[in-house]
Image (cartoon, grey):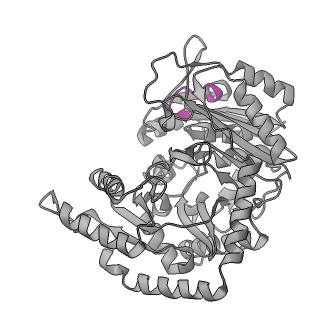
Amino acid sequence: MAERVDILLISYGSRACAIADALKRSEYEVHLFIADRQRNPFNAKIADDHVVIPDLNITRICEFAKKHSIDFGICCPENPIIKGIRDVFEGYGIKMICPSKKYALEASKIRQRLLIEEVWRDANPRFFFFRRSQYSEGGRLDVDALRKDLFAVLDDFNNEVAVKPDIPAAGKGVGVWGEHFKSREELWEHFISIFKSGSDVIVEEKLIGEESSFQAFCDGSHIVALPETRDYKRAFDGDMGENTGGMGSYKDREDILPFMRREDREAEERIVERIFSKLRGKSREDGLIGMPFYVAFMHTAEGPKILEINSRPGDPEIQNIMPVMRDDFVEVCFKMLDGTLTRIEFEKRATVVTYAVPMTYGGYRRKFSGDMRVDLSGAYELQRKYGDEALRIYPGAMELSDDGSTYALSSRTVCAVGIADSLENARDISLDAIRSIDGPLWNRWDIAAPHHIQRSIHQMSALRSGVSEHENNDRRASRQRDNDCCTHYL
């Protein structure tokens, strides 16, 4: 008879459904107790007890957990992690798979930049900080001084910058010159809106290259890297439109992406290992258990640069990973808690995630007044046809009503994960499922499209061949001079 394991899952969106699905595939007798932001139809069906806590209040989650004999908990959304849910639960003797508040690097991009600068300076772009405390006196914001200093930085960067809030913005707070801004006034409006919202602002060098998402599970002593994925943040085909939480993603058969070389992956691993070693110190650090490093890298002519570090599994990137994990995920969790996780095996298969989203998401429509009912029965019928090994459907921002109907909410509604021996076939399966969903939703059609992948391959080839080592040395020297004088903005 299988050993019973009682697991608390703190959930929001499709990411948590993918993790719940992996837990339920375990050889253990898994009993899932899910605290959710809404009545997600997937979770409501598989949970032994399912509670809706719209703000994911930590106190209420604790009250729910104490009703059950929890062996361990997993937190998927970032906000409870940043607020210290691990620290609170440890006080009640409940083990948690997520970083402690101290190691939730996602809480501050400025802290990330300073940490990277200390341990691997070349992984940072050039950057400047604008702190609210420097430009506020007696509750009054010195807008003129702020604008003057910002424009001085723009002069230094020739306007080629990315503007980011220090605090998390669910992937939607970043604005980039030439993509989101065509003039300094547009950039200023974005900049000052972040400042007035209560966040410090970081202005960084705009990086040219190809993005990858690096995820790793950690047991406090070791980090185990997961296969690379590629996220699509922009709303519309062709990487147009505003930033979103992610419209889809892909993973190739191997653990690297088509545009990457093996040495790119090895460089990422060295960088993250150095950050981990700095935080861990000389002994095991329980506060790093879980996924403290979900790192967005930009592969440039100068090597990989870090765009940001998140402190939880990626959404949609973890949906690419969980369906092809060979290891029993409950056993992986126990190894994380015991400090014995050194390896995870994955099937050599490609996966493509496509999100279907509401009509007003990403600015697709300014207004939609119609019925938000969504019927997934066609997609589930297709899943039965293909089999679970080829297709998985994970509802996200969906609400299950008392009569059994499901409705789209305001964020990403549902994702389809296609799984196959090639990216092309995985993409076809994912899109086939998306087309089978009945409801007022839309999606990108170019996630993992062959032309997009080829463009990435050609871009990286051009970057690698077009910049000589002499030019790289000149850039490093220029960057050193810039960083030596950037303290005026700290």
- Residue 277 placement: quadrant: bottom right
- What's drawn in magenta, residue-wise? 35-43
Q: Is residue 153 left or right of residue 174?
A: left
Q: Is residue 358 visible?
A: yes
Asked whether 351 falls inside the magenta stretch, the response is: no
Which of these two is toward me, 11 or 359?
A: 359
Q: Say if 379 sits above or below 258 in the image.
A: above
- Residue at the image point whose x is 59% and y is 15% from the top: 405
Q: Residue 11, how many percent across, how many down?
A: 56, 38
Q: Residue 272, how many percent across, how many down?
A: 62, 70
Name the residue at the left extreme.
138
Q: Say if 109 sits above or below 376 in the image.
A: below
Q: Say if 251 sits above or below 111 in the image.
A: above
Q: Residue 397, how many percent across, how many down?
A: 55, 31
Q: Is residue 223 visible?
A: no
> Where, quadrant-wise, is the C terminus in this rendering?
bottom left
Q: Is residue 136 left or right of residue 233?
A: left
Which of these two is toward me, 290 or 434?
A: 434
